[in-house]
Amino acid sequence: MDKILIHGGKQLKGEIKISGSKNSALPILFASLLTDEPVIIKNVPSLADVDTTIGLLNFIGKKAIKKGHTVKVISKQKYKHIAPYDLVRKMRASILIMGPLLARLKKAYVSLPGGCTIGSRPIDIHLYAFKQLGAEISINEGYVKTFAKNGLKGNVIHFKFPSVGATENVLLSAVLAEGKVTIINAAREPEIEDLANVLVKMGANIAGAGTNKIIINGTKKLKGFVHSVIPDRIEAATYMIATAITKGHVTIKNVEPKHLYTISKSLKSCGITIKETQNTIFVKWTKYLKSKNIVTGVYPGFPTDVQAQWMALMCLAKGTSKITETIFENRFMHVSELQRFGANITANGNEVLVRGVKKLSGAPVMVSDLRAGAALILAGLAAEGKTVISRVYHLDRGYDALETKLKTLGANIKRTKI
Ligand code: UD1
């Protein structure tokens, strides 16, 4: 298994380009199931989760081919209605296949995506929504079996929590339902808007994406599309924090600054200089970092997907910061690994206190999940001496060309087989 080796202490300088958003690319790939016409998706990041999605589409009956950062999907054969365990278990987002299959085939058998290290992550909100649209649901032998014998029908869906995945699954099914579907308390993440823009290009009738009330008027048939995926705001946030933690100065290109408003604001209040243009963000460390409390929240709140990276940064800030996780129940797996660098952190329930230290020292550490892995990379970049990070396959799920991009900025980082 690959490991990543970092000799820390190098200031990051220069410029890098952010890849397309993983969390946008995946639902958009699933949207290809809603039409028999060809689709072309550009700015798709090279990631294990994208490969998993392409594998799943091909299994179901599409022919999806990725060349560089473009994926072309054409129809090859009649769809299967079963998404088996072996293809689904690798990635929770596989549950997004349920909406399109239910809409097109009136039935879908999808293996339960299961838990993961950041919490139990149930799918009850997705299933409630499909029931509201008229589907019958049963769970047996590890599969969620959904049927909509007479097709999906319009209704009001009131989410108890604005789940990103459930909002996407409803969009991916309601566009072909009969009548009007209203989602109350919908997720507002930029990735939802990107998916809705694609569906509208396909001929869907959607109003309110990006707000907490989305109205979809079902259509009978959808057409092909060409679309370029929005930039990955979580990848961008990670490089912004990498710049701050290494006392560097970096221009981050191909970003949507408004999607990063909360991150930029938080970094500014720590003393980091941020300058934005229409699609770049310049980040510069100028003076000793001040600590800052954060509480994760749904968009436009502080993203849970940047909580671990923020914790790494706070390890080297002046004073004590409190980090509160409100989205996932068990998302502090990185605490014990950050402590191996010499960080002073105490966890209590969904809160963590980070007391800033003067320096971190390189250490052997292990990745537990994607964003925890990003936090360890950041700590390794800032730490004195050598860091060896194992189980880096988690990072390959979400960071396109991670080592190459960091090397371009002057980091001493490489992947090894040792
Ligand atoms: C998506 C993102 C993930 C991000 C998360 C929150 C993708 C592929 N992944 O995940 O990177 O961290 O949004 O911004 O886009 N929940 C339930 N029942 C459900 C669904 C969710 O209880 O049916 C809970 C989850 O366990 C979690 C919370 O709601 O505690 C948020 O989940 P959700 O917004 O659905 O996140 P994902 O779509 O899984």
Image: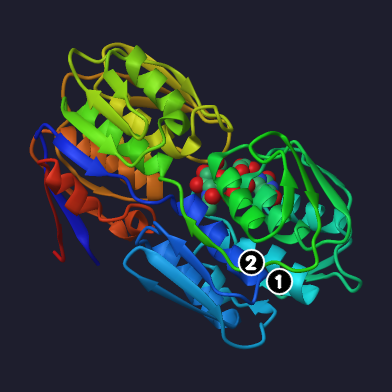
Q: Position of residue 167 (x, y in %)?
A: 68, 48
Is 38 left or right of 410, judged from the image as shown?
Answer: right
Circle 1: element type: helix
Which residue shows up at 16% across the image and 66% down it?
Answer: 417
Is 156 left or right of 378, judged from the image as shown?
Answer: right
User: Is residue 120 among the parts visible in the rendering?
Assistant: no
Which residue shows up at 66% across the image and 53% down it?
Answer: 200
**Marks 1,2: beta carbons within 8 A:** yes
Three-letter code, disc 2 = Ile
Q: CA distance from mark 1 to mark 2?
A: 6 Å
Which residue shows up at 70% across the image and 79% down it?
Answer: 81
Quadrant the N terminus occupies: bottom left
Hey, which residue is sitting farthest right in the picture?
Answer: 150
Name the one closer to the observer, 340 or 46. 46
Name the one closer to the observer, 61 or 144. 61
Tell me which corner region of the image, top left, top right, bottom left or bottom right, holds residue 34.
bottom right
Tell me which corner region of the image, top left, top right, bottom left or bottom right, holds residue 188.
top right
* Residue picked out by circle 2: 97
Which residue shows up at 61% across the image and 63% down it?
Answer: 31
Q: Position of residue 209 (x, y in %)?
A: 67, 41
Q: Position of residue 310 (x, y in %)?
A: 36, 29
Q: Is residue 182 above or below residue 78?
A: above
Within 10 Å of disc 2 (Cα), the crowding (few <14, some 14-19, many 20+) is many
Circle 2: element type: helix
* Residue picked out by circle 1: 101
Q: Position of residue 315 (x, y in %)?
A: 28, 25
Three-letter code, disc 1 = Leu
Name the one closer to the observer, 317 or 408. 408
